Amino acid sequence: MNVPVGVLAVAGIWLFLGETIHKQEHNIDYIGSALIFISISALMVVFIQAGTVWTWSSAPVLLLMGVFTVGTYLFIWQEKRVAEPIMPLEIWKDPLIVAANLATLTTGIVLIGISSFLPTYIQGVMEQSPIVAGFALSFMSMGWVIAATLAGKTMFRYGFKRVAVAGGVWILIGSVFFLTLRPESGWLWAGVGSLLIGFGMGLARTVFIVGIQNSVEWKMRGAATASNMFMNILGNAMGAAVLGGILNNKLTSYLSGVRGEMLNGEILGVDVINVLLDPVKRKTLPQEVIKIMTSGLAISLQYVFLGLFILAVLSFILILFYPARSRDAVNN
């Protein structure tokens, strides 16, 4: 299904997109790219390992945080001195870009949290099939597409900020569905929450991209758009690391109280979750083990969903700082 749509999209761009290209040589900021790669990689390792494999005060964590701090400082220094920085720092002086990018970061964490842990809850806790889990998750895509279409028609009529705030409200409401999610709630409850969050994302994210692109000069649109995409990717990476760390930490803590339980001679551990999510392998587990793992997974995921709710609140607050600009101001 994706291939025909992709072919039509390429054909449409080729036939109908008109643009004036000014050819000139550019210098790629390889040093800046390397510095930001090293800095963010060090931070990601800390988020993944700290609190589970390493303590927060351990030497590896402190060393990696030092690498992140020094690398970030050198990256900023590098971007100030090169003619064509990979991320021009002047775009961060615009309050609209700052608010949009920070909200993109937090909503990016929410997005990866739902994408990663909604199927886990439906399969592992509710004991539904992967098809049901995927169907519930697909509600988010449906809501996103519908809302993005509406945003394109309403943002110039009602104002960028109003549409973005409306998106933040829907994200917040959707996160409440996950905060109150219980095993007996049913997969449809989770699906509705996914739909509402997707609807909110479609409104807010569309406003962010269009607003950013229209708040800078034409030659800066690529860099400004890239900054927003970077914050989204960073949010996804941080979300996977931090929320995954919360799940592992809480599940490990829960299982520490049931160390007497055995599975084929082995002590129960976090890795057994992979068996729990497999319908075939799940049938090989004793009922006592299934009960323990299901309960532990449900409790641990509740902490993850609590984190998503807090991030949804933070996202809404950040969206409130999105500047209200007139249509003419945005277009200019």
Image (tube, rainbow, N blue to C red):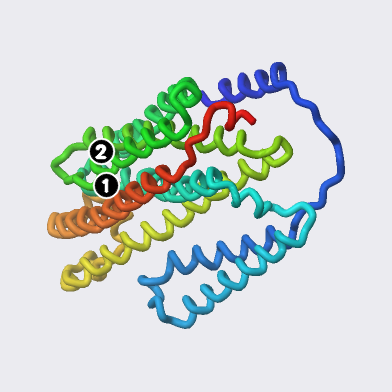
Q: Position of residue 67 (x, y in %)?
A: 58, 73
Which of the two residues, 282 or 332, is positioned nearer the viewer here? 332
Residue occupying image coordinates x 19% and y 45%: 180
Q: Which residue is mark 2?
A: 190
Q: Name the quadrant containing residue 268.
A: bottom left
Q: What amino acid type is highlighted by mark number 1?
A: Tyr
Q: Which residue is mark 1?
A: 121
Mark-to-mark CA distance, 2 and 1? 9 Å
Q: Is residue 143 visible?
A: yes
Q: Position of residue 102 (x, y in %)?
A: 48, 50
**Element type at marker 2?**
helix
Q: Name the quadrant containing residue 327.
A: top right
Relative horizontal placement of residue 44, taking residue 222 as reference (left or right): left
Does 52 sit above or below residue 27? below
Q: Position of residue 204 (x, y in %)?
A: 44, 36
Relative horizontal placement of residue 97, taking residue 54 as reference (left or right): right
**Element type at marker 1?**
helix
Does 259 sit above or below residue 6? below
Does 155 sit above or below residue 185? above
Residue occupying image coordinates x 36% and y 33%: 166
Can you tell which mark lies on residue 33? none
Relative horizontal placement of residue 231, taking residue 279 as reference (left or right): right
Q: Name the quadrant containing residue 42.
A: bottom right
Mark 2 vs 1, N-terminal side: 1
Which of the two residues, 202 or 282, is positioned nearer the viewer here? 202
The reply to whether discs 2 and 1 touch (Cβ–Cβ < 8 Å) is yes
Q: Is residue 131 visible?
A: no
